[in-house]
Amino acid sequence: MKEKKRFLLLLGLIFVHLLLISIQVPRGSEPTYFERVVFSVFTPVEHGVVSFFRGLKNFWRNYFYFRDVQRQNQSLRDEAFRLRQENLALKNLLLKFQGGKGIQDLLSTVSRSILVASVIGIDSGQIYRSIHLNKGSTDGVRKDMVVLDRKGRLVGRVIEPVSSRESRVQLVSDEDSGVGVLTERFRVVGILQGDAGGKCRLKYIVKTNREVMVDEEVLTSGLDGIYPSGIPVGRIVSITEDTELFKKIIVEPYFDLSDLDQVAVFTADLRDLS
Amino acid sequence: MKHFVEGVVGIVLAVVLHTVLGKVSAPLLIVFNVFSWVVLYFGLTRHEVFGAVMGTVCGLLQDSLSLGVFGVGGLTKTLLGFGAGYISRKINVTPVTRTFIFALIMAAIELFLWKSLVLFLFGERFSAAGGLIFLQPLFTALFVTVSFQVHRRTEAGRS
C-alpha cells in the first residue's frame, strides 16, 4: 500500500472516532447502539473467563483442598444460626410496631427481590467508575436498580448498557455519579460525588455548618429519586475549608473493590417499600 | 488471513488478561494496560496499517468496557498503532534498548494524549492513583520489548 493511501486510512479512522465522540454529545450519557453491540459481544468473554477460573477453583476446593473445611463449615453454621435468630427478632419487632399482613407481604417482597450477582469485570479506563455483573435483562436486571455489597452497603446503581446476560453498575465513587445523602447524627443533607481516586466528596455543605464531623457515617437520603433512604454509604475522613461558600468534605465509601466478588441487586424499587 | 487470526487471538488474549488482572487485584489494571500492549506489539511487528486497525478495535473495546467517553480510547490507540508502525519502519528499533526506549516513549505519549483529551475536552478529573498510573508506560514498554524480541528471534529462526 502506498504511503498516501496509508495516511488516508488513518484520516478515515480518525474521522470515524470523532464521529463516534460527537454522536454522544446530543445523547448525553446514554450509550450509542454501537457501544451496546461491542459491550454485548465482549462482556460474555469476561463472563466466560471468570466462570472458567471459578470452575477451576471450585474443582480444586471440592475434590482436593479440604484443609480447614470443617472449621469453615462450623463457622458458617454458627453465622447462619445467628442471622436466622436476628432475622426472626427483627421480623417480630417489625410486626409488633407495624403489625398486620402488610408487613409480611413487604418482607416477602424484599426477600424475593434480592438477586445475587457476581462481579465479572472492572472498568478498563478508570477502576473506580464501574463494574460488570454476570446478570442481565433476562435475569430481570433493569436500569437504575440499586446494588449493595454483601454487608448491605451501597455500591452503586445499574446503568445502560444492560445486555441479556451482563450488566454495568456505576459505582458511587464515579465522578459522574450523584447520590443524595445525609449525615448520621444531625441529618445534614448533601450530595455525594466520586473524586476519581476511589473516594467521594460530600458537596454543598456550607462553611458555617458546624454539625458535620470527621468519622461520622453517611447514609442515603432518598431525595435523589433513585436510592431509597437509610442505606450506609461511607464515613467522613476529612473536612477542610474549600471555596468561600462550601466545606471540602471527603468521604471514604464502605464498599471495597478488592472484596467485591458478589453483590446484591434489588430488582424491586426499594423506595416503594420504605 | 494469518495476520487476521493473529489479530483476533491478540484481542481475545487481551480481554482474558484484562479480566484475570481485574479479579486478582483491581489496581493492577492501572499499571497494566493490556490493550496498549497488543496495539504496540502489532504496530511494531505488522506496521502502521495493521497497527492502526488494531488500535481502533482495541481502543473501542477498552471504551466499551469503561464508563468514559466512547471513542477517546479508540482515537488515541489508533494514533499509537499507526505511529508505532510508521516510525518503526523509518528508524531501526530492533536492538533491545532501542525497542524499550521507543515503546516507553510511545506508551507515554499515548497516556498523555488520552489523559489530556479526557481532562481538557471532557472535563474529567485526573487521578494518578497514588502514582501507579505513571508506571503504566514502563510496564507497557517492558512487555512490548520482551514480546517483540521473542517474535524477532522466532522469525529469524524460521528463515
Image: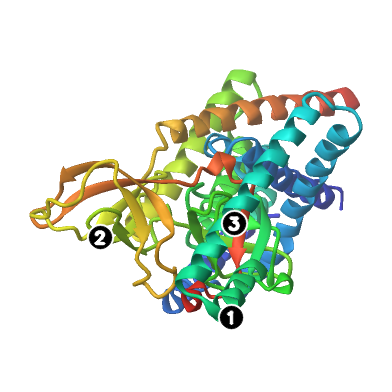
Q: Residue placed farthest to the front in the image?
A: A96
Q: Which chain is mark 3 on? A: A
Q: Position of residue B101 (x, y in %)?
A: 53, 25
- Identify the residue position indicated by label 2 in the image: A187
Q: Position of residue B144 (x, y in %)?
A: 64, 31
- Identify the residue position indicated by label 3 in the image: A87
Mark 2 or 3, nearer chain start = 3
User: Quick check: can you spot residue B38?
Assistant: no
Question: In screen coordinates, is B38 left or right of B4?
Answer: left
Mark 3 lies on a secondary structure that is helix
- Mark 1 in CB contact with mark 2 (< 8 angstroms): no
Residue A254 vertical placement versus B102 (above, below): below
Q: Residue at x 49, y 43 (%)?
A: B110
Q: Amino acid at mark 2?
A: Arg
On the same chain, marks 2 and 3? The answer is: yes
Q: Amino acid at mark 1?
A: Lys
- Disc 2 versus disc 3: nearer the observer: 3
Mark 1 or 3, nearer chain start = 3
User: Which numbered marker is on residue A101?
Assistant: 1
Mark 1 or 2, nearer chain start = 1
Mark 1 lies on a secondary structure that is helix
